[in-house]
Image (cartoon, grey):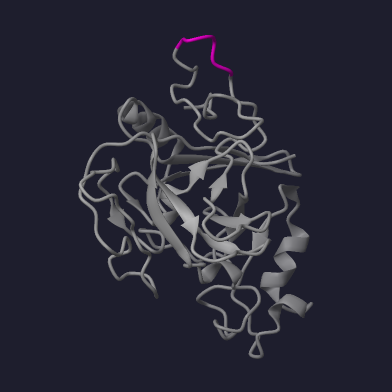
Amino acid sequence: SAPSIFLTGKMSLQTTTLDISEGKERSPIPLQTIPGKRTPTVPYEYCPIRPTPEEESLEGCGCFLSECESSDGCPCNQRARLVSADPTPRFECHSSCFCSSPSCQLRRTQSPFLDVIVRPVGGIGFGVFASRMIPVGVFIGEYVGELVTPAQAQLRFKQYHGVSNYLMVYRENFASGELVTTYVDATSYGNFTRFINHSCSPNCEVVAVRRSSLSSPHMCLFTIKPIPFGTQLSFDYGSGVSARPSRGNLEPLGGVKCHCGSSNCKGVLPFSESL
C-alpha cells in the first residue's frame, strides 16, 4: 500500500524577491509576482538542505568507479535488499563513501531539479510550476524542514491551527511489524518544495530515501507522470489515506478546503488523526 503522508497549510503576508532561494541553490528559482498585489506566504528561512546535520550510523562504500548501483559488493546497494518495508525503502551513498558524487547513480536525490518557477495560485498562495517539460521518474527536490519528535509535532500542530502549517507526517510499515513515522516541519525552515500544493490527482509522489542513517530518511519528491511546460507540480498530502469529506456548507473536517479542482477531488485536504 502507499505510504501515509499528511501535509496542510494556510498563509500570512510577506514581501517577495526575484530568486526565492536567495542564491543558495546552484541556479536561481524565479519567483513571479503580480504587480501591485501582495501574495500571501509564511516568513521562513530558505534551506537547500536539511537545517540539522545527519548522524552517520551507516557504513560508507569503498567504490571508486561510481558503479555502486550495479555492484553486488557495494554496502549502500545491498541495504535495499536487506530491509523489507512498505513502501520499498531506497538507500543512497553519502559523505563517507569513496564514490564520485557527480557520476554515482546512487546519489539521485542529491542534486535537485531546479527548472521550476514559483508563482501565485488563486486562493491558496503560491505554487510550483514546470519551466520546461519534466519526464516521469525525475527527482524534483527534497521536502526540507526540521526533523521533529511526535510530541513536538503534536504541539506545533496545535500552535499552527488557523495560521500556518507545513508539517509532513510520513509512515512506513516494516516487515518486522515496526511502524516508523517521520515528522518534517518546513514552517520555519524549508526550500521551494514547501510551495508544492496538494492534488487528489497528483503528478509527483514522496519517497523516503536513506543515506547515512536509518532513523532519519529524506522525504524526496519524484514525478510519477510527464509534466508539461507550465503545469503545476503537486503531490497527494494524504497518499494512501482517504480524506474525511466535508458536510454540506459546514467547515471541512480537518480544517482546510481542497482547491485542486481535479475530477476526483475529495473536497478537503487530508488530515492526520495522530496530530
Q: In the image, is residue 247 part of the stretch drawn in magenta?
A: yes
248 displayed left or right of 135: left
For residue 1, what is the image quadrant? Answer: top right
Nearest the eye: 203 or 92? 203
Q: Residue at x 63, y 90 (%)?
A: 64
Judged left or right of residue 4, residue 218 is: left
* Residue at the (57%, 39%) spot, across then down: 199
Q: Where is residue 72? Give x, y as percent.
A: 79, 77
Task: Name the spot of residue 50 as percent of width and height, x first.
Answer: 41, 59
Instruction: Give whichever of 162, 261 is nearer the camera.
Output: 261
Q: Is residue 157 above or below residue 186?
A: above
Of 207 and 96, the residue lying toward us? 207
Where is residue 274 drawn, in percent x and y? 52, 26
Q: Is the residue 109 above or below the residue 271 in the image?
A: below
Q: Residue furthest front?
A: 35
Spot occupied by residue 28 in the image (x, y as percentages of width and height): 36, 70
Residue visible at 62% across and 49% down in the picture: 203
Task: Using the image, determine if residue 272 lies above or below residue 100.
Answer: above
Look at the image and tell me whether residue 143 can be seen.
no
> Which span of residues is magenta-colored?
245-250
Is residue 113 found inside the magenta-colored segment of the image? no
